[in-house]
Amino acid sequence: MSRSDNPLRRLPSVTQILDTDAIKELQTRHAHDLIVDAIRAELQVIRVKVLDGESRNGAPGAEAIALRVQNRLRVDLQPRLRSVINATGIVLHTNLGRAPIAEEAAKAAYDAARGYLNLELDLDTGKRSSRQDPIREWITRLTGAESATVVNNNAAATVIALRTLTLTPGPSPGGRGEVIVSRGQLIEIGGSFRIPEIMAVSGATLREVGATNITRLSDYEKAIGPQTAALMQIHTSNYRIAGFTQSVTTEELVTLGKKHNLPVIDDIGSGALLDFNRFGFTGEPIARASVAAGADLVLFSGDKLLGGPQAGILAGRKELIQRIEKDPLMRAFRCDKMTLAALEATLRIYLNEDAALRDIPVLRLLSMTSEELKTRAEDLASRLTALGSLESVAMAEDVAYVGGGSLPDQTMRTWIVEVKPQTLSDAEFAQRLRLGAPAVMARVRDGKIVFDVRTIFPDQIDSLVQAVKLCGMCGMPANP
């Protein structure tokens, strides 16, 4: 091939592409070096295709390459954390951020982020205060505890509680005592974080008692000795043991703790502030009930059944809370201003139970009736059928789970819409939905895409239908 016949010589230069209208428009929003890197990357892709004979029309011109650079930057620079339509029906979907927070809580976080607020300032006196004080007030009102404090998640709450309660005074400064826990409660809370490992991180010594399925009060009492620092109860929120079982109640453990002058830690996990029996779910401990039973410290999450932002809440005796807040780890574990603002707003909603049921998304999603879900499914099925690009659309009653490690063995009735793509496989169609804007996360089952209407918000229906329409156009990208 002579030099004059080399198709690569017909490629425009970087300078020529920079001079196009499309690139000039990009320069108002992006750094020069970023644009140049994108142009060079696009040119390299074109060179490879031309040399391999894949480019039928030869080398493209400057304007055509500029448009490809625009698209490359749009894809490369889109946020990695993006809005997702949760069509799985799993209310507390850990991979999708668990609980969606109330509008009032989201606004509080936004206002805190965009400006200043009295995070550690007493507006009355003008002096420095604790960032825990505003949160403490609402938690104590709602739980009946003497005091409370907040850290960044419930694992951190467990670590710092164990550190504080097991510090052993005496000839071995820094030594820590034993914490007695039933074998049946040594759970893994997700991401390979297990209670024995959390114990080890805190410095506490784990003392297991009982068997996997049966632990009696006498097992705890026999294990108590000079090194015992605390008794601990952990709610098995992400699994259940059924059949021949026996466990110790909080009241029984508290009585034993008082007899031996030992504090009792009750980790109730998901953080219910209301009785979930009203939704048809049983066995979920309530924070106020644990405090009323006499637990010295009650630990629970803010982002599960409570329906707020990610946080770990510790409620209980004032003296213990004060000791916890003096721990050096408290600074590492503390929440930022956005989390505290969102949590405070969420807790304030709970002061009015009717408002909580109406305004906190988790409670609203769990309390939806079958009739309401069926109506939503009928509307969605009708709109998807009208697209005319799907092989089949059908609605049906189904079951779903709460998710997030909460209420694992209890299902809830729901309604779904199943669609079968015409030209794409179920996996390809689901991937296109995930890569759309907004992304759509659905279930895939038996060659069909399953949309559970329980977790699709009403204002997301238009976007979902549009996403399905675009995915149905074979060969077209999912992004609008």
Image (cartoon, rainbow, N blue to C red):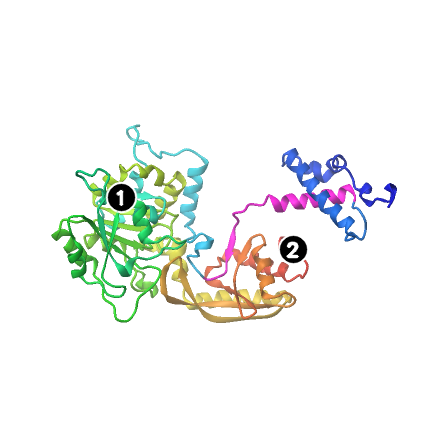
Q: Quadrant of residue 336?
A: top left
Q: Is residue 85 magenta?
A: yes
- Residues at marks 1 and 2 touching, judged by CB atoms closer than 8 Å: no
On the picture, is 342 further left or further right than 176?
right
Distance of label 1 from label 2 (alpha carbons): 53 Å
Q: Is residue 134 above or below residue 472?
A: above
| Dot 2 alpha-carbon crowd within 10 angstroms: few under 14, some 14 to 19, many 20 or more | some
The answer to if 199 sits in the magenta stretch is no
Please identify, in this view, whether the residue under mark 1 or under mark 2 is nearer the observer: 1
Q: Position of residue 42 (x, y in %)?
A: 70, 44
> How many callouts does the rendering have?
2
Mark 1 surroundings within 10 Å by alpha-carbon count, few (fewer than 14), some (14 through 19), many (20 or more): many
Q: Is residue 163 left or right of residue 444?
A: left
Callout 2, which amino acid?
Answer: Pro
Q: Position of residue 88 (x, y in %)?
A: 48, 61
Per the rendering, the mark at residue 261 is: none
Q: Name the amino acid type tagged 1.
A: Arg
Identify which residue is drawn at 41% across, 57% down: 92
The kind of secondary structure element at disc 1 is helix
Q: Nearer the viewer, residue 177 or 238?
A: 177
Q: Is residue 41 left or right of residue 92?
A: right
Residue at (52%, 47%) from the top-left corner? Answer: 81
Residue 163 got which mark? Answer: 1
Q: Which residues are magenta?
A: 61-89
Residue 37 placement (x, y as % from top left)? 66, 38
At 31% from the left and 51% from the top, the residue drawn is 300
- Image location (x, y in percent) of residue 109: 42, 42
Q: Is residue 288 above or below residue 442?
A: above
Under tag 2, what secondary structure? loop
Q: What's the mark number on residue 477? A: 2
